[in-house]
Image (cartoon, helix red, strand yellow):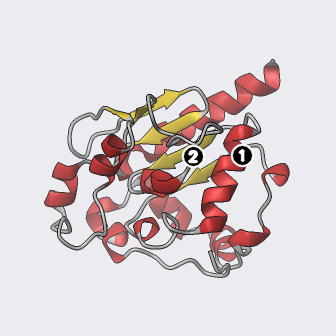
Amino acid sequence: PKGGQPPLDPKSDEPGFQTEQTRRFHADPQAQAVLSTTVTLDSVSKDDYDAIFYPGGHGPLWDLAEDKDSIALIEATYRAGKPVAFVCHAPGVLRHVKAADGAPLVRGKKVTGFKNTEEDGVGLTDVVPFLVEDMLKENGGVYTSGDDWGSYAVQDGLLITGQNPGSSVETAGILLATLKAAKAA
């Protein structure tokens, strides 16, 4: 939310969570330069983007899930008819996001996110402020999941969610296909 170099969740940077894509990203000096100079979240407008994508890591559970600017950006983007995508722990940022009628955005929608069993697997169940799976269910989301650590993503209209780090490519692919279809229409 503060801009600049975003903090990195140390668990997400462990060797076991690295993929071909993350290794390529870490080795790309241009991408690293862009990441190190992000803008402040309160300066971002839905009008400047075709979609939003929130990557995972545990961090969003502490800051973005409670950040008024993040909540407002997601609500405005979704209401503008633009896709919103979240992967791994990032669906946790939907905790306080509301639909136009004031109900939780996820209510009645197919969603996924980091599973309770995956959180148990990394030993952080008692550390995180809330469990993504539980929160999505409590807010009325129709939660589904795949195998622990396997790629699994779902789309319900403009809402796209991916289960875990291994779901990042699939989630991004669904978002890109959604944008391509919107452009062709």
* SS category of the residue bearing label 1: helix
* SS category of the residue bearing label 2: loop
Which residue: 62% across, 36% down?
101
Name the one closer to the observer, 96 or 10.
96
Which residue: 58% across, 26% down?
157
Which residue: 64% across, 72% down?
35
Vertical arrangement, residue 154 with respect to residue 113, above or below: above
Mark 1 vs mark 2, CA separation in Å: 12 Å
x and y percent of residue 152 in the render? 35, 35
Crowding around mark 1 (Cα neighbors within 10 Å: few <14, some 14 to 19, many 20+) is: many
Vertical arrangement, residue 26 with respect to residue 131, above or below: below
Q: Is residue 115 left or right of residue 170?
A: left
Name the front one of labels 1 and 2. 2
Q: Amino acid at mark 1?
A: Thr
Q: Quadrant of residue 81?
A: top right
Vertical arrangement, residue 26 with respect to residue 36, above or below: above
Query: Residue at the top extreme?
Result: 185
Q: Is residue 177 left or right of residue 12?
A: right
Label 2 belongs to which residue?
98
